[in-house]
Image (cartoon, rainbow, N blue to C red):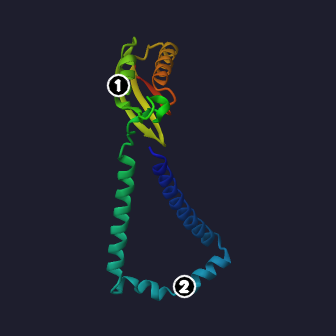
């Protein structure tokens, strides 16, 4: 998930939470009998409020509110469902110090095959049943994510050492590139 998506989700949750807390607080103070809240409610013209559904603008207002809520909800859903995939990762900065004088050279790699290579290495370990890999953008950091499903009897300590060794090898293959490696181990149900 990208950082902007995470911030947007948190802002939406914060706004909804504050509205619900405010409504709950108003309701609670009404039931407790706080006089200032009851005086505020008494000042409302209930006749005017009860006539709102009979006004000519009411169906339009409801329709616009429903469409805006639907579009906002769909947009939020699509932003969260879309997988953030990093583009190619530059591993050598461009500039003459990396190449002959006068040329401008840079090197970048596609992270998908690196994730597939890491998955291949992990799939060769004893007790590993299935492996899934992906290269994602996790809050602005390119990440090689490998999900491993293994036998419940796997030696977790040995697997962890091997996964850390493979992750260090991936980091060495990308000198200076900000790429994280994430290995998720799931144990299959016992037979």
Residue 44's disc number: 2
Residue 79 percent across, percent down from the top left: 38, 51
Q: Secondary structure at mark 2?
A: loop
Q: Residues within 10 Å of mark 1 (few under 14, many from 20)?
A: some
Task: Judge from the rendering whether residue 68 lies leftward or rightward of residue 154; answer left or right.
Answer: left
Q: In front: mark 1 or mark 2?
A: 1
Say how many tags the image has: 2
For this orientation, the residue located farthest to the front is 101
Task: Judge from the rendering whether residue 5 lies leftward or rightward of residue 26; answer left or right.
Answer: left
Residue annotated with mark 1: 116
* Residue drawn at point x = 40 percent, y = 18 percent: 122
For this orientation, the residue located farthest to the right is 35
Q: CA distance from mark 1 to mark 2?
A: 65 Å
Residue 114 appears anywhere in the view: yes
Residue 189 appears anywhere in the view: no
Mark 2 or mark 1, which is nearer the start of the sequence? 2
Residue 7 percent across, percent down from the top left: 51, 52
* Residue drawn at point x = 32 percent, y = 74 percent: 63
Q: Quadrant of residue 137?
A: top left
Q: Residues within 10 Å of mark 2 (few under 14, many from 20)?
A: few
In this rendered view, identify the residue nearer to me: 42 or 135: 135
Residue 160 percent across, percent down from the top left: 50, 18
Q: Quadrant of the N terminus?
A: top left
* Residue drawn at point x = 57 percent, y = 80 percent: 41
Task: Judge from the rendering whether residue 24 lies leftward or rightward of residue 109; answer left or right.
Answer: right
Q: Quadrant of residue 22?
A: bottom right
């Amino acid at each position: 998930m990208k950082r902007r998506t995470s911030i947007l989700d948190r802002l939406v949750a914060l706004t909804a939470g504050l509205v619900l807390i405010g409504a709950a607080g108003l309701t609670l103070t009404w039931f407790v009998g706080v006089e200032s809240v009851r005086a505020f409610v008494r000042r409302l013209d209930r006749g005017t409020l009860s006539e709102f559904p009979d006004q000519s603008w009411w169906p339009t207002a409801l329709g616009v509110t429903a469409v805006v809520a639907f579009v906002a909800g769909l947009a939020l859903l699509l932003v969260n469902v879309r997988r953030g995939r990093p583009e190619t990762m530059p591993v050598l900065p461009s500039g003459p110090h990396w190449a002959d004088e006068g040329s401008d050279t840079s090197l970048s790699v596609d992270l998908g095959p690196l994730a597939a290579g890491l998955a291949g290495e992990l799939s060769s370990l004893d007790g590993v049943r299935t492996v899934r890999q992906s290269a994602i953008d996790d809050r602005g950091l390119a990440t090689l994510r490998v999900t491993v499903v293994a036998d419940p009897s796997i030696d977790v300590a040995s697997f962890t050492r091997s996964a850390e060794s493979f992750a260090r090898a991936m980091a060495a293959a990308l000198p200076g590139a900000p790429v994280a490696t994430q290995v998720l181990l799931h144990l299959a149900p016992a037979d």
